[in-house]
Amino acid sequence: MLNKGNDRCLSTLNNSTKNLCIFRMVDGLCEGLSSFSGPSRAALIYAENPHDAMRIYDPQNLLQGHQPKLKELYVSSRSWREGPRHEPHDQFDWQPLPEKNLELAGLISFGGRTRSIYYQMWFTEHHPDMCSIGPTERWLEHAVCLLAHDFANRDAVYLGSSRYVIREYKTHAVRDHVRDQLNILFGWDTQIEVYPILDAVLDISRTQEEGAWPRGKLVCIEPSELSKVSFLIRFPPVEQPSLRNHKHVRKLLIAAENSDRVLVADGKNVVGIASGTLPECRISADFKGGYGFLKLAGELVCSFSDGSFHSTNRKPKLVELEEALLETPIDASVRGSLFQVVSAIVHRTCESKQGCTIVIDLNYQPLVTSGQKLERPLNLLRPDLLHLSEALANIDGALHIRSDLKLHAFACLLDGIAVVGEDRARGARFNSALRFTAQNENVIVVVVSSDRRISVLQGGIELTAQCDWKPISEFVAPPPTLERWLEE
C-alpha cells in the first residue's frame, strides 16, 4: 500500500512538473515574440500520448472564435492521431516530425511530433505588418523541441531554463529561417555563413559615421557566384575588410549611399563595390538611416532597428481605420480611395518622423474647423496634389479631408471638453483629437506621433488602444481537454 501511495505522489509530481513546463514555455514565448513583433499571445494544443485526449492551454484567449475549426480538426476527425510516429534512434533525438501551419485566419501555427509528446501545435498572432512569417514559424518549431525535451527531462534544476532560451531566440529564429530558405532555394552546399552576416548587420546599423546613421546596401553573395557580379572596385584577397570590423565596413558603406552601387561581401569579408544585376543567391541589408531591412534573394525577411531584428515592415497599420470606414454608409469605391489617400499621407509622415493629424469628415454638411481654408479644395486623387497635402501635414494642426476625397483645410486647431480616456503622456495632439471626436459625430481622426505611433480615434475612443495582458498565475493545474474547452 505504501508503494502504491508513493507511485501516486510521484505521478502527481510529474504531472505538476509538466504543467509548469507548459506555463513557463508559453510565458517565455510571449515575451520573446512581443519583442520581435509587438504584443503577442501564444497558445498550445497537445496530446502527450497517441490515445490521450487533446488538451489546450490558451491563457490569453488567442483561439477564441476558432472553435468550429478546432472541433473539426481535433474532435470530429481522428486524422491527427494517425500521423507518422516518431521513432528516434536514441533517447536524445528531439528533432520533431513537423506539422505545418493550419492556416487559421489571423494566426500563425506550427507543430510537430516527438518521442516524449505525441502531438503539439503552437499558435501565435499573425500581425498584419509582418515582413515574413518564416522566423516566427521557426520560433514555434523551437518551442516544440524545447517542450519535448522538458517533458522527457523533468529535472527541477533545468525547469526554468527553456523559458529564457525561447524568450531570447530572436536572432536565432531569423538565422534558422534564412538557413532553411537557402537550403530550399539553392541546395545544401551553399557556403554563406548566416550568423556572421546577421552580427555584422546589427553592428553596422548602430554605428554612426560623423553623426550620421548608415545608408546604402550591403549584399552578401554565395562565394561561387561572385564571378557573375559586375564589380566597379574589387579588393585584393589579402586586403579585403572583415565583416567583423564593423567600423571599417560602415565607412565603406558611404560609397553606396544614394546610388545604385552596393557593397559586396562573401559572408566573411567585403570583396568590393558593384552595380547592376546581382546573383539570386544573396542576403541583402538595406540600411535606411535609423533602421533597415534584411532580404533573402530579394524577398523581405525582417527589419532591424535599435540593434535588434523585428518582424515589422514598418508600413502604417491602419486596420482599425479600414474597419471604421466599413461601417460608414459611403460608397465602397469612395471608401477604398479614401483609405488609400489617408494611408499615403500617414506613410509619408511616418517616414519623415514629423507627426500629423488627419480629420476625416463624413458629414453631409462639412464641419466648421478653425484652420487655413482653401479657395478651392485640393483633389487628392491627383498625385501632385496628394504630395502637396503630405507636405501640408507637417505644418502644426490637422488636415481636414471630406468624403469627396478633397482637402478642405490644413493647420486646423482641434479642441473640446475634457473626456474620459485622456492620457497626458500622449501630448496635446492626441488629447485634442480625442476631445474633438467626442464632440463631433461622423468624424474619424488619425493621429501620427513623431515616434511613428498611430492612433485612430472616433467618438472619444481610441480604436487602436491595446489592452495589456493580465498577469498569468504560475498555477500548475492541468490544462483542460479540448472537448471541455469547446463546451465552455
Image (cartoon, rainbow, N blue to C red):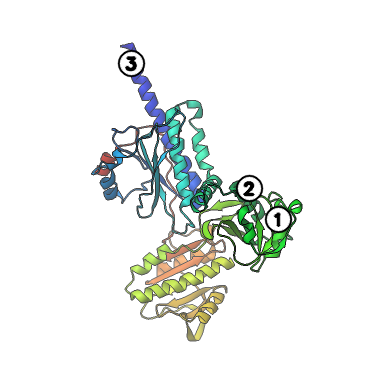
Q: Residue at x 36, y 23 (%)?
A: 11
Would residue 265 appear left or right of 431 to someone viewing this image?
Answer: right
Give the x, y percent position of residue 241.
73, 53
State whether residue 289 appears in this view. Answer: no
- Please provide percent x and percent y for residue 35: 52, 49
Could you tell which of marks 2 and 3 lies nearer the N-terminus? 3
Q: Residue furthest top?
A: 1
Disc 2 residue type (three-letter): Pro
Say what secondary structure mark 2 lies in.
Answer: helix
Q: Quadrant of residue 484?
A: top left
Measure how far apart labels 2 and 3 are at the Cα level. 55 Å
Amino acid at pointer 3: Gly
Q: Who's the residue at 50% across and 72% down the image?
A: 345
Q: Nearer the viewer, mark 2 or mark 3?
A: 2
**Residue 437, horizontal then vertical, whole percent:** 42, 68
Kindly report which numbered mark, 1 or 3, lies closer to the viewer in this rendering. 1
SS state under label 1: helix
Q: Is residue 383 above or below residue 188?
A: below
Q: Dot 1: within a 10 Å radius of its alpha carbon, few (fewer than 14), some, or many (20 or more) residues?
A: many
Q: On the image, numbered disc 1 is attached to which residue?
A: 249
**Which residue is identified by label 3?**
5
C-alpha gap between disc 1 and disc 3: 67 Å
Secondary structure, mark 3, is helix
**Residue 15 shows in this picture:** yes
**What residue does disc 2 label?**
196
Viewer-closest of 243 and 439: 243
Q: Who comes first in sequence, dot 1 or dot 3?
A: 3
The reply to whether the C-beta atoms of the residues labelled 1 and 3 are less than 8 Å apart is: no
- Quarter of the picture holding the N terminus: top left
The percent position of residue 415, horizontal first and vertical second, equals 48, 70
Q: Nearer the viewer, residue 220 or 103?
A: 220
